[in-house]
Amino acid sequence: MKTRDKILLSSLELFNERGERNITTNHIAAHLAISPGNLYYHFRNKSDIIYEIFLEYEKLVDYYLDIPEDRPLTLEDMTFYLESVFDGLWSYRFFHRDLEYLLDGDSRLRQDYRDFTNRCLDAISRIFEKLAEAGIIEPQPEELRSAMSLNVWLVITNWMAFLKTAHAGEAAVTLTLTELKQGIYQVLTLEIPYLSPAYRDRVMALREKYRPHLPDAAASDGAFDARVGLIKK
Amino acid sequence: MKTRDKILLSSLELFNERGERNITTNHIAAHLAISPGNLYYHFRNKSDIIYEIFLEYEKLVDYYLDIPEDRPLTLEDMTFYLESVFDGLWSYRFFHRDLEYLLDGDSRLRQDYRDFTNRCLDAISRIFEKLAEAGIIEPQPEELRSAMSLNVWLVITNWMAFLKTAHAGEAAVTLTLTELKQGIYQVLTLEIPYLSPAYRDRVMALREKYRPHLPDAAASDGAFDARVGLIKK
């Protein structure tokens, strides 16, 4: 692997594990056992590294959300989109955590992130449109579909923060990909009222697979379990 | 006003305006033209100030979300709850921005915030229950109501971050209370499929009042306007 790619990979790993705020370019260089000078040969500063990582993230999500126009969508497609979006959130999880500060520090990233969000909102709306064409959900007027898509986006991008703040016990919680994907349960909750009778049972069964459950450490709060519809393992 | 209260008020103002991360106790003391020693007489450190501010926020929201048990809810009640929650978010807007870091740094705050979230989720669920009793929305099974309430919470607590990231133009956007309250449009979008026929038109008219519109600087992106259901002024 090229040094440049190694720097990006290690940076992503360190940002995800310890938070972008706590990692300097010196940490990254030390982690790779290269000199700071070598790192600066490839990237002018940490913002440049973050921007390159964002471009990778963007590429991944754009690839996942490439919606086929030559055939109807299936439930399997819908599942794939949901799984992929949460996989992407997981792989680049430092990003949404520190988003506002990252954007404040880099106007190029700010503009790109805005465009990225708009593409994602478009894709979500297009998915709803195609799910309606396929008879999986009832058709919605465009205005409602847009507002619904934005709610899907708000739920998806806030789920991790919810887990890390409201859901956590005494200690800072170590999040798992499984817990993160339980956000799919919340996204599918948004779809429930729009499901076609023919697909309702199948989507409800799919949703059930993602039903959130608390880690043992926090599971003592039974009232909370009941409240957010959580079950104990 | 007592020095202690002045410190809390100035801290809140500075945190909201410039971000908690950028404000030290020295900034706060300088802003009040008091000595750092005087500040430390009242608060051991910045975490203590933040914790006291949180207690005020919590008290405010608990006060707003005190649901009457001796009478049915009205649409006016629902509007009041929505307006109040967004007023609270506005007055303490630094808090949700930096939530994860604030909680990482203070286990007392972490525990309290978790309890606070759970009370809010309870209150939202109770409001839905009482709106159904009043015939404003159709009754929902408890499990769905819980998941719906959590989605309401996720939308409310993520709306400001959405405005400040995806919605912003080239420059960092200066958010207004009016824009923040447009989040009510998104919350009411969640209720649409559950509205009773008798109340549907009134709630849809209420929702329309909060329809988001972009500030002029960003209004050039027509595709985005259409997508998230925005209109130009």
Image (cartoon, coloured by chain):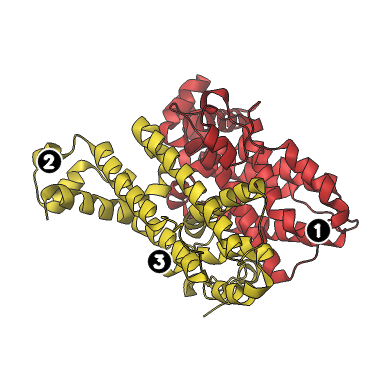
Chain colours: A red, B yellow
Q: Is residue A81 left or right of residue B135?
A: right
* Residue A127: quarter of image: bottom right
Residue A150 location (% of width, % of height): 62, 59
What kind of residue is marked 2? Pro
Residue A105 location (% of width, % of height): 43, 49
What kind of residue is marked 3? Leu
Residue A221 location (% of width, % of height): 51, 31
Q: Look at discs 1 and 3 and give the one toward the viewer.
A: 1
Describe the element under mark 2 as helix, strand or loop.
Answer: helix
Which image quarter holds the C terminus of chain A? top right
Task: Indicate which disc residue B36 carries.
Answer: 2
Describe the element under mark 3 as helix, strand or loop.
Answer: helix
Task: Indicate which disc residue B177 carries.
Answer: 3
Residue A52 location (% of width, % of height): 57, 42
| Classed neighbour count for the residue bearing mark 2: other residues with Cα under 10 Å, few (<14), some (14–19), many (≥20) | some
- Residue labelled with disc 1: A137
Distance Cα–Cα, label 2 vs label 1: 61 Å
Residue A205, above or below B91: above
* Residue A202: quarter of image: top right
Tags 2 and 1 in contact by the CB under 8 Å rule? no
Of all chains, the one bearing label 2 is B
Marks 2 and 1 on same chain: no
Which circle's residue, 2 or 3, is located before the other in the chain? 2
Tags 2 and 3 in contact by the CB under 8 Å rule? no
Front residue (pair B44, B29): B44
Q: Look at discs 2 and 3 and give the one toward the viewer.
A: 3
Q: Is residue B7 left or right of residue B163?
A: left
Q: Look at discs 2 and 1 and give the one toward the viewer.
A: 1
Of all chains, the one bearing label 1 is A
Describe the element under mark 1 as helix, strand or loop.
Answer: loop
Front residue (pair A123, B50): B50
